């Protein structure tokens, strides 16, 4: 058996690993297990917080590192934190005010829990914050929010759907997270396959050896990718593993 060219498969979750019912299909789960048995590290690389990603890691039996909240956290193993980047509570307060100003839905992950517009906290300064997000179908409102965020400076802005904006500390992305995972595993970014569908996957898709866009990916992601596979409802991940990681085995 020849040595594999790619040693790490970094998987976005929503719109990539998960179908539209937020499930991992049996076929996708089966091929992930095959890849693991062949020596491929499989790493979840998600905008979700660890408590929203963990059930899927458990389902797949993953013991490998994990990138959560778009890179604000990197886990050595499912319950072993490697690094965490926090946001200034003053920025969180300002972003909440922007959300109210434009009547946008908003949410934020603290280390402990998920808050949103309907269930907010009076204790912004007393919590450790990882990420903030806006969601609005109103294009003009989203544009204005982006303008205000850009003026604030020092923020990493992406999305996980065309109608949302996700904000991390400046310089923090799935690419920075996966680079840390590579250090932990002793491998190079050129030995990584990263798969995703949204702008929060763009940096890592551009930074790795093989960047893959799902068939349902946003146009900008497809343009940046080395490869486009089937959609998240058609087991695109299986195609990545079978045709591009294990092919020629």
Image: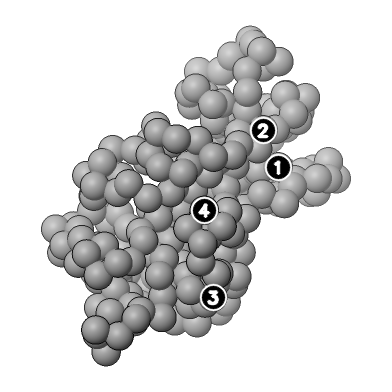
Q: Which of marks 2 and 4 is in front?
A: 4
- Indicate the secondary structure of the residue bearing disc 4: helix
Q: Please name the residue that numbered disc 1 is placed on.
A: 169
**Residue 86 circle label:** 2
The residue most toward the top is 122
Q: Please name the residue that numbered disc 3 is placed on.
A: 190
Residue 89 picture location, percent across and down? 72, 24
Q: Are marks 3 and 1 in contact (CB under 8 Å)?
A: no
- Indicate the secondary structure of the residue bearing disc 1: strand
**Residue 184 circle label:** 4
- The answer to whether residue 103 is seen in the rendering is no
Residue neighbourhood size for the residue with mark 4, other residues' Cα within 10 Å, grouped as few (<14), some (14–19), many (≥20): some
Whole-angstrom CA distance, mark 1 to mark 2, is 7 Å
Q: Are marks 4 and 1 in contact (CB under 8 Å)?
A: no
Q: Which colour scheme is used?
A: one colour
Q: Are marks 2 and 4 in contact (CB under 8 Å)?
A: no
Quadrant housing the N terminus: bottom left
Residue 15 picture location, percent across and down? 37, 57
Residue 11 appears in which quarter of the rendering? bottom left
Residue closer to the observer: 93 or 56: 56
Mark 2 or mark 4, earlier in chain: 2
Mark 4 or mark 1, earlier in chain: 1
**Does 136 sit above or below residue 39?**
above
Residue closer to the observer: 19 or 84: 84
**Does 46 sit above or below residue 128?**
below
Which residue is at 83% across, 41% downward? 152
Q: Are marks 1 and 2 in contact (CB under 8 Å)?
A: yes
Q: In this view, does 204 lie to the left or right of 193?
A: right
């Amino acid at each position: 058996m020849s040595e594999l060219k790619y040693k790490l498969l970094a998987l976005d979750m929503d719109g990539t690993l998960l179908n539209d019912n937020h499930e991992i299909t049996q076929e996708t789960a089966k091929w992930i297990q095959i890849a693991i048995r062949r020596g491929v590290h499989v790493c979840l690389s998600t905008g979700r917080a660890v408590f929203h990603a963990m059930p899927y890691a458990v389902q797949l039996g993953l013991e490998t590192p994990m990138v959560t909240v778009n890179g604000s956290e990197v886990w050595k193993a499912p319950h072993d934190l490697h690094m965490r980047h926090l946001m200034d509570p003053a920025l969180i307060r300002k972003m909440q005010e922007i959300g109210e100003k434009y009547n946008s839905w908003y949410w934020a992950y603290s280390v402990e829990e998920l808050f949103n517009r309907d269930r907010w906290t009076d204790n912004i300064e007393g919590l450790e914050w990882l990420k903030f997000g806006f969601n609005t179908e109103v294009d003009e409102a989203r544009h204005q929010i982006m303008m205000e965020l850009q003026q604030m400076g020092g923020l990493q802005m992406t999305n996980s759907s065309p109608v949302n904006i996700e904000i991390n500390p400046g310089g923090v992305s799935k690419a920075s997270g996966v680079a840390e995972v590579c250090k932990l595993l002793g491998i190079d970014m050129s030995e990584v396959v990263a798969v995703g569908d949204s702008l929060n996957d763009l940096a890592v898709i551009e930074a790795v050896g093989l960047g893959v866009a799902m068939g349902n990916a946003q146009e900008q992601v497809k343009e940046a990718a080395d490869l486009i596979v089937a959609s998240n409802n058609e087991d695109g991940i299986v195609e990545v593993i079978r045709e591009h990681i294990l092919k020629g085995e």
